[in-house]
Image (cartoon, helix red, strand yellow):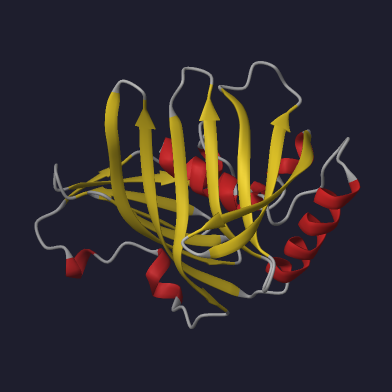
Amino acid sequence: MKKLALLILMFSVAFGTYAQSDARSKSILKKTSKVYKSMKSIEASFSFTTSSAKRKPVINKGKLWLKGKSFKLELGDQEIMCDGKSIWTYSSTTDEVTLESYSKRTNQMSPEEMFSFYEKGFKSLYEGKKTDGGKSYELIKLVPKKKRAKYSYIHVEINPSNNYIHKVTQHMKNGMEIVIEITDFKRNARVSSNLFTWDSSAHPGVALVDLR
C-alpha cells in the first residue's frame, strides 16, 4: 500500500498549494494545478523504480485510473480497486482478495485527500530546466515542513508545453530513491464505473477475505 500512497502523492503535486514558495515555482505549479483540475478522469501508465547505492534499481510497470472519488491501480502482482466506499486489494501471488471499508482505513489517504495532500505544508523551489530523453522539463524541488517525514525532498519534472507531470523523484533519508515516471497519459479517458469494483466472475476460485 506504500506504493499506492506514493502514486497519490505524485498526482497531489498538481492540485496542492504551497507555503513559502518562490514565485517561479508557484507560477508553474498553479498552471499544472489548473490543467489537472479541469480533468474529469485520468488514465496513466508509469514506471516505478526504487534504487540505492547498495543495490541495482528495481523497476515495475503499472497503470492508474482516477475518476472522481474512485481509482484503480495495477502494479506488479497487485490490483487495487476503490469505488469511494470500499477498497479491494488483489494479489495474484496469493490468489486472494481483501475487502475493506475505505472510510475505516487508517493507513491510507481518503479520496478527498488525494488532490490536497500538499496543502499540509511544503515549500517549492524552482531549480531550472532539466533535459530527459531529449526533452526539456521544468524542475521543482519540494521540501516538507515537517522534519519527521521519511524523505528529505521531492523533485518534480513538469512538461512546459502542456503542464503535465513527467516524473517525480522522492529522495529518502536512508539514501534510497523512488522514481515514478509517466510513460503514457490520457486526460478525460472513457472509464467505466465497473473498473473500480471487484468482479468475482472474472476471477473464479479467488478467496475473498472480508475485513469490513
The residue drawn where x is 45% and y is 32% is: 177
- Residue 139 vs residue 150, the one in the foreground: 139
Is residue 106 in view from this perspective? no
Q: From this viewpoint, which residue is outermost toward the left?
A: 205
The residue drawn where x is 14% and y is 44% is: 93
- Residue 102 vs residue 24, the one in the foreground: 24
How many discs appear?
0
Residue 152 left/right relative to 206: right
Q: Where residue 55 sits in the image (x, y, percent)?
A: 27, 26
Q: Where residue 117 sits in the image (x, y, percent)?
A: 69, 43
Note whether 169 is above or below 29 in the view shown. above
In the rendered image, the quadrant that contains the C terminus is top left
Residue 89 left/right relative to 152: left
The residue drawn where x is 51% and y is 31% is: 107
- Residue 22 vs residue 197, the one in the foreground: 22
Q: Where residue 159 sits in the image (x, y, percent)?
A: 63, 64
The residue drawn where x is 46% and y is 78% is: 191
- Residue 157 vs residue 81, the one in the foreground: 157
Residue 89 left/right relative to 155: left
Query: On the image, which quarter does residue 125 sit in?
Result: top right
Is residue 62 in view from this perspective? yes
Q: Where residue 131 sits in the image (x, y, percent)?
A: 56, 56
In the rendered image, the quadrant that contains the N terminus is top left
Query: On the image, which quarter does residue 193 sit in?
Result: bottom left
Residue 202 left/right relative to 78: left
Note whether 33 is above or below 157 in the view shown. below
